[in-house]
Amino acid sequence: MLRYTLMRLGIFVGCLVVVWGLVYSGLAPRGLGDSNGMWVVLLALLLSAPISFVVLRKERDRASVQIVEKVDKVKANLEANRAQEDGVDDAARAQGQTS
């Protein structure tokens, strides 16, 4: 998961550098007034999203498999705890009925 996040951040930073270069060279429009920095960041986000969607497909699939495995493990532990509590409750009820 960390690897995917770092790769996505790297693509964003690369796009940020490219957009910054295009804006300051005059090939891309500047923002209005003092919004130039925000304009560059928004353009970089707009460009990096589809690039990372396509380029990082395999890494995203690996990360999602890891997440699913962790969620399944937590669910199994929760179910085991729930079954253990039900067993204790059943034993307490049985003991209460016999006395």
Image (cartoon, helix red, strand yellow):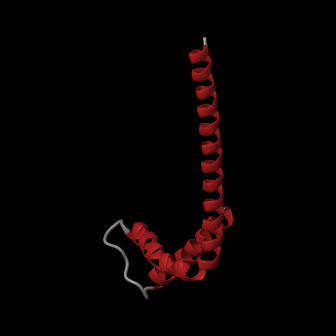
| 58 relative to 37, above or below | below
In the displayed structure, 99 sits above or below 15; it is: above
Q: Residue, x 60% and y 22% (percent of image)? A: 94
Instruction: Place residue 82 in its image quadrant.
Output: top right
The picture places residue 19, in percent across and down from the top left corner, at 49, 79
Given the current orientation, which residue lies at the most extreme right position?
3
Q: Nearer the viewer, residue 6 or 92?
A: 92
Q: Nearer the viewer, residue 73 or 50?
A: 73
Where's the N terminus, which quadrant? bottom right
Image spot of residue 10 (x, y percent): 62, 72
Give x and y (percent) for residue 26.
43, 86
Q: Residue at x 64, y 74 (%)?
A: 59
Q: On the picture, is 90 further left or further right than 32?
A: right
Image quadrant containing the C terminus? top right
Quarter of the image holding residue 72?
A: bottom right
Residue 87 appears in which quarter of the rendering?
A: top right
> On screen, 2 above or below 12?
above
Q: Residue at x 60, y 72 (%)?
A: 60
